[in-house]
């Protein structure tokens, strides 16, 4: 048996279809008809979420297989992806194949960069060729970046699982009937081992998309068993086409591991910045909060958007506070400079804030009036003057605490690490493929 790595991306457009569904169909066929064996769960890899040309969540798929006859499998998958893609209505698919027992370092390095940076198609071609990857592209070929990015991602450290259940074609586009109470119960029963099923703050079920695609629901969690337990627990009334458990970097903050320096920040990248708040935050229309941050003398604006639920917290920051922020860099325009879109806020050190008061009169006890800068104070009542008085500083209670603040689940990106996952991150791959 040969080891064959297969990755594909950009098969879908906004009008429907879905790369994971194609992966589900391909896996079903390969297992049943070609005796292929998966050596890992199918991988659902999310890449840089700030790519402007993504359709939705910038997801790509990789399958690691043991196959009898690689050529036959390659022919089949190539045809299935070509036929199953929305070529001509926005998709620019690419399929990549690598016959190898290991994943070359160059490919892994490319993948690590594709999590937070913008990669060119030319660069992906160069890496593919150097790694001995056979690839096929359609449309403008941009899908090769995602394919290579997914293939190079081994998920040796932190990872999660998602069970995705698919609808029969006759139901695509019809409303999904999902019992809210069952989702709430399932979330409570499986806490903290599943995540983002239900947003308690907003009272919203999060497992189902609202688009007309084939996905019925997706359940995210820490192990294959726990996500599979959703099927009996949520007992969908609709007859489903089937389901697959994907291993994924969703919920891991993988895109935010890169340290950004303000002095050479690049549009569309993602990462984290250690910095100081350098201006008092203010709210703009829509409830979004803007402030500036400084690092080694370089300064730039940061925005916390209202739907994240973090705007109220950010509004309590003060100039001088030491923070770390996870960010996506929004491109500058002729009207606006580049801006850091905040994805999480960690308050490291709060600066003391004081209320300043004039001193009390030594003679009669009344609060004095200032005579001007460095000119001392005079009492209005008894007219006593004192040139050596100073303002009194009264420390104010800060209405914010040090610690980590992350968005409400409804506003999470696929890669956002939910609060409950902090401290239970995985450091290795623990689950044998069943
Ligand atoms: P869905 O989530 O529904 O699968 P999507 O959001 O993944 O859709 P795609 O249709 O896959 O959207 O389009 C994303 C495109 O961006 C692909 O062509 C992919 O190759 C490309 N891409 C992904 N990551 C990067 C990156 N870091 N730099 C440049 N291009 C990228």
Image (spheres, rainbow, N blue to C red):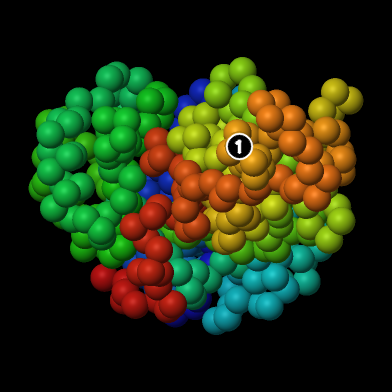
Q: Is residue 331 left or right of residue 363?
A: right
Image location (x, y in percent) of residue 162: 34, 53
Compare residues 59 and 301 and report the one nearer the observer. Answer: 301
Residue 38 in sight here: no
SS state under label 1: loop
Q: Nearer the viewer, residue 95 or 61?
A: 61
Left or right of 308 on screen, residue 205 = left
Along the line of sight, which residue is nearer the eye, 85 or 167?
167
Could you tell me which residue is drawn at 64 percent across and 22 percent down? Answer: 284
Q: Which residue is mark 1?
A: 364
The residue that appears at 21% across and 37% down in the rendered structure is 240
Residue 370 visible in the snapshot: yes
Image x and y of residue 113, in percent:
70, 62
**Numbered disc total:** 1
| Dot 1 crowding, Cα within 10 Å, few <14, some 14–19, many 20+ | few
The N terminus, quarter of image: bottom left
Q: Position of residue 236 (x, y in %)?
A: 15, 35
Q: Please give the name of the residue rendered at 68% of the width and 78% of the height, measured from the top-left corner.
A: 105
Coordinates of residue 308 in the picture (x, y in percent): 49, 36
């Amino acid at each position: 048996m040969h080891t064959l790595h297969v990755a594909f991306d950009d098969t879908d457009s906004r009008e429907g279809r879905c790369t994971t569904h194609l992966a589900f169909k391909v896996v079903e066929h390969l297992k049943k008809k070609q005796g292929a064996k998966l050596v890992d769960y199918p991988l659902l890899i999310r890449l840089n979420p700030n790519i402007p040309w993504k359709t939705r969540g910038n997801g790509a798929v990789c399958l690691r297989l043991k196959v009898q006859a690689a050529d036959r499998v390659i022919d089949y998958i190539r045809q299935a992806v070509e036929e199953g893609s929305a070529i001509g209505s926005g998709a620019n698919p690419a399929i990549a194949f690598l016959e190898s027992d290991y994943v070359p370092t160059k490919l892994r390095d490319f993948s690590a960069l594709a999590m937070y940076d913008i990669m060119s198609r030319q660069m992906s071609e160069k890496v593919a060729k150097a790694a001995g990857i056979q690839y096929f592209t359609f449309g403008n070929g941009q899908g090769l970046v995602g394919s290579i990015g997914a293939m190079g991602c081994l998920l040796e450290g932190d990872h999660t699982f998602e069970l995705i259940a698919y609808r029969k074609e006759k139901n695509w586009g019809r409303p999904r009937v999902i019992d809210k109470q069952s989702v709430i119960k399932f979330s409570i029963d499986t806490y903290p081992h599943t995540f983002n099923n239900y947003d308690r703050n907003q009272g919203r079920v999060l497992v189902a998309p609202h688009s007309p695609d084939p996905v019925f629901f997706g359940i995210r969690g820490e192990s294959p068993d726990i996500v599979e337990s959703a099927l009996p627990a949520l007992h969908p009334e609709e007859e489903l086409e089937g389901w697959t458990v994907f291993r994924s970097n969703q919920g891991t903050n993988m895109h935010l591991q890169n340290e950004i320096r303000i002095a050479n920040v690049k549009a569309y990248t993602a990462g984290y910045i250690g910095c100081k708040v350098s201006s008092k935050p203010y709210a703009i229309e829509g409830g979004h909060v803007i402030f500036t941050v400084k690092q080694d003398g370089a300064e730039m604006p940061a925005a916390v958007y209202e739907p994240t639920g973090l705007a109220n917290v950010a509004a309590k920051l003060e100039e001088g506070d030491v923070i770390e922020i996870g960010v996506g860099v929004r491109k500058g325009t002729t009207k606006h400079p580049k801006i850091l879109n905040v994805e999480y806020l960690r308050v490291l050190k709060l600066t003391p804030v004081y209320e300043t008061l004039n001193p009390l009169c030594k003679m009669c006890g009344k609060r004095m009036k200032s005579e001007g800068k460095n000119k001392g104070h005079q009492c209005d009542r008894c007219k006593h003057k004192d040139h050596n008085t100073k303002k009194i500083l009264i420390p104010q209670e800060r209405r914010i605490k040090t610690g980590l603040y992350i968005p409400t689940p409804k506003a999470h990106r696929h890669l956002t690490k939910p609060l409950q996952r902090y401290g239970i991150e995985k450091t290795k791959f623990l689950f044998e493929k069943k």
